[in-house]
Amino acid sequence: MKLRSVFTFFLISAISLVTVPGHFGWAETWEPTEAIEFIAPANPGGGWDTICRTSARVLQKTGAITKPIYVANMPGGSGSVAIAYVVQKRKADAHLLVAASNSVTFSMAIKRALYTYDDVTPLAQIASEYGAYVVRADSPLKTLGDLVAALKADPKSVTFSGGSAPGSMDHIKVALLGKAIGKNPLELVYVPFQGGGEALASLLGGHTAVASLDVSEVAGQLEAGKVRILAVQSENRLSGFPDLPTAREQGIDVVFPVWRGLYMAPGAPQPAVDFWTKTIKNMVASPEWNQERQKLGWEPVVRFGGDFKTYVKNELTGYQSLLKQLGFLK
């Protein structure tokens, strides 16, 4: 009886090890079992919307994801509404990915967002791009020098549109320009919209004079000849748009990189995080993704795992300091 009891004990223990997640490997794997949702924290037409729709298209085109993928637009507070919803309503949801960029970091830094990256699961940076100062094709502002001259004469004479809230990313690009030309950044007139698409529509409609957006957000209108880019906020000319001048080469030292990435819900199961990490790594290495990326003018800068988590946490600290320098935080 004692031998039988000992044998039974070890048999049950062995079965338990096999069936408990984390043992012998098989239970550590995860794959989607239902439709995938991408949340774009802005209205259609902007950078976050582009992240979601481009990623979804490539993932399905390459067969990496066979389940349906749909995009939900959730504008508000430059990512603040979306992150609050995810933290409060979608904990541990392995079928949810959320678009992110520097804009949500600014919302965290200025305390507009109630949560930080510690409250969600940072997943990956999938590309990098740069901001730009954009005008209509028929604008009297022909060069960055024209814009600078107008602002020096009267900082309130030019209205800027942007797809993020006051004190967030698109506004910061305007503020950096003000600082670079010796003007109070808070004097420049910035009109916020709920996404890059709306900010661009304001520019095209003649309601604002300059759009502070990212190159990918205006690539289509640029190709169609409806807008001109006065300057790109990059160190060097972009590989995808070599004809666009930088602000720096025109004597204005404004450089502003914009990362594009994704985060998951808090408490997302580690096997799901591992699945999505591997899947997104494969996506950004695919020819299909790189073809789309080049069209958008995105640069192939990627980060994953601990590297990405460290990057966004350090960025948050740095932006708090920058916001104080620009007068947005005391």
Image (tube, rainbow, N blue to C red):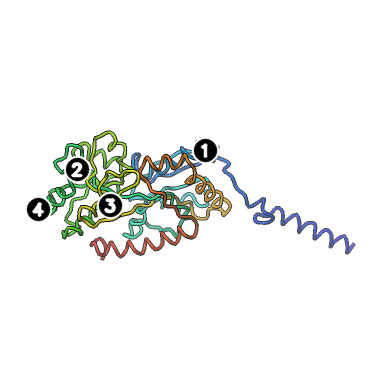
User: In the picture, which quadrant includes the C terminus?
Assistant: bottom left
Q: Which residue is mark 2?
A: 208
Residues tagged 2 and 3 counted as in contact (Cβ below 8 A): no
Q: Nearer the viewer, mark 2 or mark 1?
A: 1
Q: Nearer the viewer, mark 3 or mark 4?
A: 3
* Residue 57 in sight: yes
Residues tagged 4 and 1 counted as in contact (Cβ below 8 A): no
Q: How dense is the environment of label 2, judged by Cα within 10 Å: few (below 14), some, or many (20 and up)?
A: many
Q: Secondary structure at mark 2?
A: loop
Q: Nearer the viewer, residue 81 or 282?
A: 282
Q: Secondary structure at mark 1?
A: loop
Q: Nearer the viewer, residue 107 or 227?
A: 227
Q: Label for residue 233? A: 3
Residues tagged 2 and 1 counted as in contact (Cβ below 8 A): no
Disc nearer the start of the sequence (3/4) = 4
Please give the name of the residue rendered at 44% of the width and 52% of the height, measured from the top-left corner. Answer: 302
Mark 2 to mark 1 CA distance (whole Å):
40 Å
Q: Label for residue 62? A: 1
**Residue type marked 4:** Ala
* Residue 195 in sight: no
Q: Secondary structure at mark 4?
A: helix
Residue furthest to the right: 1
